Amino acid sequence: MKYFSVPDYHMHTPRCNHAVGDVRTYAQAAIKHGLTEIGISDHSPMPNGFDAAWRMGLAELPGYLQEVEMVCDEMQADLTVRIGLEADFHPGTEVAVQSMIDAYTWDYVIGSVHFIGDWGFDNPDEIHRWDTMDVEDAYVAYFDLLARSAATGMFDIIGHPDLIKKFGQRAPISSHRVDQAESNMLDAVKEAGMVLEISSAGLRKPIKEIYPHERIIEKAAKRQIPFAFGSDAHAPEEVGHGMEACLDMLSRYGVQEMASFEKRQCIMKPIRALA
Ligand SMILES: [Zn+2]
Ligand SMILES: [Zn+2]
């Protein structure tokens, strides 16, 4: 089964210090793969030096917007380019992050959790901290943070909604606490009118699985929470990666629409299979 292309809303630029390729190269790669819409969503500046090595500084934000707008104008006949941002939800940073979001016009803002307390749980340099961590506790803490991020109303899309599994640690399948924390998170997402990202990035990580897990997709579909697509590309060749696998997964749960964004308005569009 072949599908119409879906918007890939999650990709980075070298400003975050761990991606390669300028915006034009990402856009050219998207056109090459037959995509008609993408969104650039680089790691946002954060206050107080939070995770500063892995993101742009505040002074780089205007240049980021300028570069995306320039490519957007250049490519408009062949490709729609949205301007997005991947901001972190980290308790205590909300006021500064909100004022940064408010200072510019975005098509969408992804809210992601990459830290539990001071632990950058998806950072390969901090993988050893899993050794002293109760896996079930880590999952519950992670989903609680996602629920809190949704409740702030600051973001449009929940990024890679079970990133906690990236390196392969899994909570017991029978865990009632994790099941409950996932459900609470999804209730908060529904309540906030937000969208869940379905991300192919996990397929390229040790877990080798789409984010989020099928069980979460099933629960989200039951709640009629919309999905947006993201490859989380940190290199142009990753643009559009795994989108067919994501579409197959959603079709198994009867999801027939996908979310697109313009100036922070969510527009639902049909997913149509090509014969
Ligand atoms: Zn990144
Ligand atoms: Zn992320």
Image (cartoon, rainbow, N blue to C red):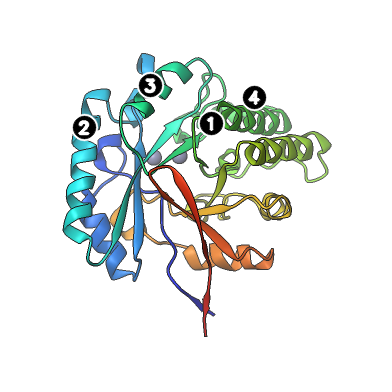
| Tally of numbered discs | 4
Q: Amino acid at mark 4?
A: Thr
Q: Earlier in the sequence, mark 2 or mark 4?
A: 2
Label 4 crowd bin: few (<14), some (14–19), many (20+), radius 10 Å: few
Which residue is identified by label 4?
132
Q: Residue furthest bottom?
A: 275
* SS for dot 1: loop
Which residue is identified by label 1?
121
Label 1 crowd bin: few (<14), some (14–19), many (20+), radius 10 Å: many
- Residue 78 sits in quarter: bottom left
* SS for dot 2: helix
Label 2 crowd bin: few (<14), some (14–19), many (20+), radius 10 Å: few
Q: Nearer the viewer, mark 3 or mark 1?
A: 3
* SS for dot 3: helix
The residue that appears at 23% across and 50% down in the rendered structure is 23
Q: Nearer the viewer, mark 4 or mark 3?
A: 3
* SS for dot 4: helix
Label 3 crowd bin: few (<14), some (14–19), many (20+), radius 10 Å: few
Q: Nearer the viewer, mark 4 or mark 1?
A: 1
Q: Nearer the viewer, mark 3 or mark 2?
A: 3
Q: Amino acid at mark 2?
A: Pro
Decide if residue 253 is on the left or right side of residue 145: right
| 236, above or below 172, in the image | below
Which residue is identified by label 2?
62
95 or 115: nearer the viewer: 95
User: Can you give x and y, in whole percent of width and height, for residue 172 in the image?
Assistant: 77, 42
C-alpha gap between disc 3 and disc 2: 15 Å
